[in-house]
Amino acid sequence: MSIWVDENTKVIVQGLTGGQGRFHGLRNRDYGTNVVAGVTPKKGGENVEGIPVFNTVKEAVEATGATASFVSVPPSAAPAAILEAAEAGIEFIVCITEHIPAQDQARTFNVLRDKYPSVRLLGPNCPGIISPGKCNIGITSGDIALPGGPVGIVSRSGTLTYQAIYELSQNNVGQTTCVGIGGDPVPGTVFVDALAAFEKDPDTKAVMMIGEIGGSAEEEAAEFIKKNMTKPVVAYIAGVTAPPGRKMGHAGAIISGSKGTAAAKKEALEAAGVVVAQNPTEAGIKMVEIVSKL
C-alpha cells in the first residue's frame, strides 16, 4: 500500500500550460501517474499532449472525477489556486510553489482548516509525493525510487528527500511512499501527519525522517513517536554545523533560543527511541540494518 495516493488517483495539474507545470506534469504522466486534466484560466478547450485543459478546477473535476491536484503556478496565484481546488472538491493538493509570503500561507492554511478540514495540503515549497511505481505528484525523480517498500520517507528538505530515496534504492531497499513536506514556516502537512499515516499503513515497516534546524516540528514528531509509533524510525537532522545565532536555509529554519537547534532535536528524537544518524549516508546505512532484521 501507500499513503494518500496510489495508481488509481486521478490528478489535475493547475498550471499545465506553463513551462514548469507542463514539464513536471508530463513527467508525472510519463511515470505512470493518472494525470487526467490541466487547468489554466482562458486556456479551456486546449490540450497538452493529449491532456485536456479546463478553465477552472470545478470544470475539470466535474469532467474527470479528479481527487488530487498538482499546483505549479506563480507565488501570487498559488493561494487562490489552492483554495479553488479545495472548493471544487479536491481532497489532496500538492503545491510546489516557493516564495509565497508567509502571511498568505497562514491565511490559506487557516481557510483550509476552517472551511475544508478534510482537504490535505502538501507544501508549499515542497518536492511533492511519490509512491514508487504507482503515482508521482511533484518534482521528485521517479528514476531513483524503488517500488515494493518497506520504508516510508518524510522530509523537510527536497534535496535530502532525493538522497534518502537514492541511498535506500542503491541498497535494494524499496519505499512505500516518500513525502516532502517543505521547509516553509506554515506547511500544510507536518511530520506528525505523515508519521501517523505510516504507522497505519500495513506495508510500511520502518520510517526515515529527515529534519533540519529551526522550528519545533521535529520535537513534536519526537513526542508523537514516543507515544504512538510502534515501527522503527531513523532520523537525520540537517544543520549540525550551522553557526549559532544565524538564520540560514529554509524560511522555516529559525532558531529561538536553545529550541530548534540540531542538538535539541537530536536529543528529543533519541529520547523517543529514534536512531539518529550524523549524515544522510549513515541514515541510509542504519535503515538498511534495520530492514535486514525485520
Image (cartoon, grey):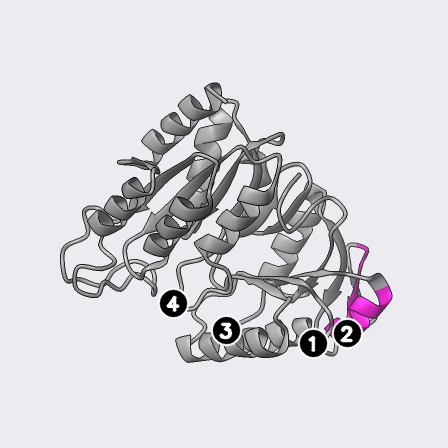
Q: Circle 3 sits in a helix, a strand or a loop, which is it? A: loop
Give the numbered dot on residue 58: 2
Marks 3 & 4, CB-CB < 8 Å contact? no
The picture places residue 4, in percent across and down from the top left corner, at: 64, 51
Residue range (magenta): 50-63
Task: Tell me the residue that label 3 is attached to.
Answer: 75
Verify whether residue 62 appears in magenta: yes
Seen at 44% across and 57% down, the residue is 182
Task: Tell me the residue that label 4 is attached to.
Answer: 185
The picture places residue 84, in percent across and down from the top left corner, at: 66, 76
Label 1 crowd bin: few (<14), some (14–19), many (20+), radius 10 Å: some
Tell me the quarter of the picture where residue 47 sits: bottom right
Q: Looking at the image, tell me whether mark 3 or mark 4 is earlier in sequence order.
A: 3
Q: Looking at the image, tell me whether mark 3 or mark 1 is earlier in sequence order.
A: 3
Against 151, residue 264 (above or below) is below
Q: Nearer the viewer, mark 2 or mark 4?
A: 4
Q: Looking at the image, tell me whether mark 2 or mark 3 is earlier in sequence order.
A: 2
Task: Tell me the residue that label 1 is attached to.
Answer: 87
Is 142 in front, or is 114?
114
Amino acid type assigned to the residue bearing label 1 in the image: Glu
Amino acid type assigned to the residue bearing label 4 in the image: Pro
